[in-house]
Amino acid sequence: MNNAVKPLVLGSSSRYRKALLERLRLPFECCSPDIDESPLPGESALRLVQRLAKQKAEAVARENPGSVVVGSDQVCINGERILGKPHTEAAAFEQLKAASGKAVSFLTSLCVLDADGAAHEAVAEIKVQFRELSDDEIHRYIAADQPLDCAGSFKSEALGITLFSSVASDDLTALEGLPLIKTAEFLRRCGYLLP
């Protein structure tokens, strides 16, 4: 890293985002943003993820002045319904049962705030086609992967990949929670040395 580059902070408590950012081999710290993630009345899924990624980055930047901050957010959309983290096995079962045989969209937003507060923003869209899933397959998957802290109720980087017939995206890491192609591009703009 260039000596002039400011400290890097990931504005997230997500172990998945932490593991993804570690792949870029840059030193960074994690700081959990304390924001209300509730959707606003009438807010679209796109607007929601854009707003939350920026609010997360801004909240962490206030606590870490002079740092470069990475914020991200993700939603799963099945039809007109926005799906969050299931938190329980029963809710995970319902999400996966509703996704069986369907195409489901994910929006993963990114906001990188440079040390001067300028925002670099992007949203990656991922389309996942689920196979037809039996109740038994869903129950076995949930027991094996425990995807209770994942929007959409699966871990694509683990056994969850077996639930799909296809995935379409410009950046598959976005499905895991942080679009690394855009993250690397924005960090280069902020002065970080990456291959």
Image (spheres, helix red, strand yellow):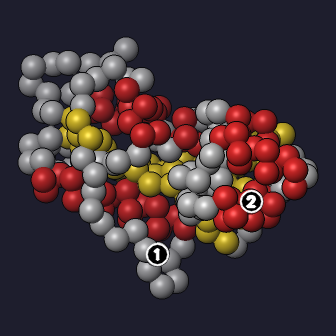
Question: Which mark sits nearer the N-terminus, 1 or 2?
Answer: 1
41 and 99: which is toward the camera: 99
Q: Amino acid at mark 1?
A: Pro
Considering every residue shown, the one lying at the far top of the view is 195
Question: Looking at the rendering, in which quadrant would you find the C terminus?
Answer: top left
Residue tagged by mark 1? 39
- Gap in angstroms between the C-alphas marked 1 and 2: 23 Å
Tag shown at residue 93: 2
- Relative to 190, residue 48 above or below: below
Considering every residue shown, the one lying at the far bottom of the view is 41
Taking the image as shown, residue 2 lies to the left or right of residue 27, namely left
91 and 170: which is toward the camera: 91
> Where is residue 121 shown, x and y percent of the image?
37, 50
Q: Quadrant of residue 35?
A: bottom left
Residue at 38% over, 31% down: 21
- Relative to 32, residue 169 above or below: above
> Where is residue 102 shown, x and y percent of the image?
83, 56
> Where is residue 119 shown, x and y percent of the image?
27, 51
Q: Secondary structure at mark 2?
A: helix
Residue at 61% over, 48% down: 147
Mark 2: few, some, or many residues within 10 Å (few <14, many ≥20)? some
- Relative to 14, residue 171 above or below: above
Considering every residue shown, the one lying at the far front of the view is 143
- Relative to 194, residue 36 above or below: below
Q: Amino acid at mark 2?
A: Phe
> Where is residue 114 shown, x and y percent of the image?
20, 43
**Number of the front mark, 1 or 2:** 2
